[in-house]
Image (cartoon, rainbow, N blue to C red):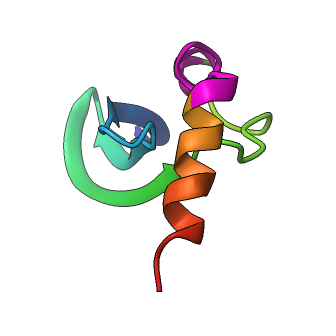
């Protein structure tokens, strides 16, 4: 039987407070991976993350403090 699953398999926080997220889409047959593809995106401090996977939401809630959001916004505004 063929099945398709999408899972968040990697989440990492970088120095700026951005959370990098990788989603894997897997085509499986009898529990074995036949095909796999990836999609990556970044959740920046201050961004709405309410539609993210619950694990990503928990990380963002812990990392995206008011201080981190302010520092990130200041760093963006200081770029030419």
Tell how many labels: 0
Q: Position of residue 62 (x, y in %)?
A: 57, 13
Relative height, residue 37 to residue 25 (above, below): below
Q: Position of residue 77 (x, y in %)?
A: 59, 69
In this rendering, position of residue 59 left or right of residue 53: left
Residue name at image x 30 percent, y 60 percent: 37
Residue name at image x 47 percent, y 39 percent: 5
The answer to which image quadrant residue 18 occupies is top left
Q: Position of residue 38 (x, y in %)?
A: 33, 58
* Magenta-colored segment: predominant secondary structure: helix
From the viewer's side, name the closer residue of 7 and 48: 48
From the viewer's side, name the closer residue of 34 and 76: 76
Query: Which segment did they paint magenta?
Result: 55-67
Residue name at image x 71 percent, y 43 percent: 46
Q: Position of residue 71 (x, y in %)?
A: 54, 42
In this rendering, position of residue 23 left or right of residue 31: right
């Amino acid at each position: 039987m063929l099945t398709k699953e999408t899972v968040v398999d990697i989440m990492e926080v970088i120095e700026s407070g951005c959370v990098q997220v990788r989603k894997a889409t897997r085509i499986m047959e009898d529990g074995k991976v036949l095909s796999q593809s990836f999609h990556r995106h970044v959740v920046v401090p201050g961004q709405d993350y309410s539609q993210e996977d619950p694990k990503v939401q928990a990380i963002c809630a812990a990392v995206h403090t008011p201080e981190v959001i302010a520092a990130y916004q200041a760093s963006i505004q200081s770029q030419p």
